[in-house]
Image: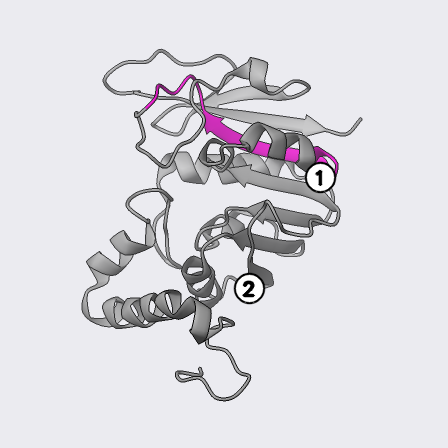
Amino acid sequence: MEIMRTHNKTVYGLDPEFNWEQILEIHMLKLAKEYKPDWYRWKLTNNFERAVFLKGDPVLPREATRYIWANQNLYGNTVLEIGCSTGFGSQFLPRDIQYKGIDYDHTIIEVAKEQDWGNRDFEFADINTFNLGFYDTIIAFEVIEHLSNGLHIVEKLKQHCKRLLITVPHHEPVGFWGEHHKLHGLSEQNFPGFEFGYINEAGFISNEPPPINDLNRCNLMICRWTNA
C-alpha cells in the first residue's frame, strides 16, 4: 500500500494535501494494531460511538441478535448497509447476496476491507451526499439517532429500497449514551408505516418493550418497513 504521495496520487484514496490528519491516523492505527491491540480496538470505537468487532471476535448478544433478525427479514438480493463499522454484521447475512457497506469514517472502512469478510464491498460515504441508487433491502442499525436530520433520512431511504430495516434506542433520554446521539426519545410515533419489535440488553427480541431496570437500562426498537 502506498505510503507517500507522488504526483497526482493519493494515500488510502485520500489526498494528502487536504486529508493528512486522516492518513496519519490510519498509519497510527496500523502500528497500534501490532503493538497496542487494546488501544487499537478502543480507538476504532470512536469513544464508544460504534460497535467494533474484528474477524474472529465473538459478537455481543444484542449486536448478533439484530443481524440475525436482519437475515430473517431480508428482501431480495441487493443489500446496502449504512454505518457498517468493520463490516462484522455482514457475516450474519447470506453469502450470495450483493452487499455494500458504507460508513462516514475512512479509517473504519479501511479496517472493514482488511477483515476479508468474503464477497462484500465497502466504501467511504456520507449518507447525506451518497448517490444511493436502489436496493432490495437497506439496513441502518444504530445510525438514525446519530444524525440531526435522521428522520428525514429515513423518509429518503424509503425512496431507494423495497425494504428498510433500522434499529434505534427506544425512548432514550438525553445524555444516556453520550454526545454522539443527536435525536432522543425516539418511539413508534416517529416511524409511520413500520412494524416494530424490541431487543433488550441481553439480546432477546420481544413484541412489547421489556421493563427498564438495573439489568436492562435501554431497549432497542427494531423497525421494518416494506414498500407495499
Magenta stretch: give its range.
Answer: 158-174
Task: Please give the residue where the numbered disc 2 appears in the rendered image.
Answer: 118
What number of labels is visible? Answer: 2
Residue located 45% across and 68% down the image = 18
Q: In which image quadrant can residue 38 be found?
A: bottom left
Q: Residue 122, how many percent across, how many down?
A: 55, 60
Residue located 51% across and 52% down the image = 103
- Amino acid type of disc 1? Tyr
What whole-number distance in Å separates the C-alpha atoms at marks 2 and 1?
20 Å
Q: Earlier in the sequence, mark 2 or mark 1?
A: 1
Q: Residue furthest front?
A: 17
Left or right of 57, for residue 122: right
| Residue 93 among magenta residues | no
Q: Residue 37, how many percent across, how many down?
A: 23, 62
SS at badge 2: loop
Dot 2 surroundings within 10 Å: few (below 14), some, or many (20 or more)?
few
- Amino acid type of disc 2? Gly
Q: Is residue 20 above or below residue 46?
A: below
- Near-viewer residue (46 or 88): 46
SS at badge 1: loop
Task: Please give the residue where the numbered disc 1 appears in the rendered image.
Answer: 75
Q: Considering the image in quadrants, where does the N terminus appear?
A: bottom left
Q: Residue 211, how many percent across, how many down?
A: 35, 11
Residue located 48% across and 54% down the image = 87
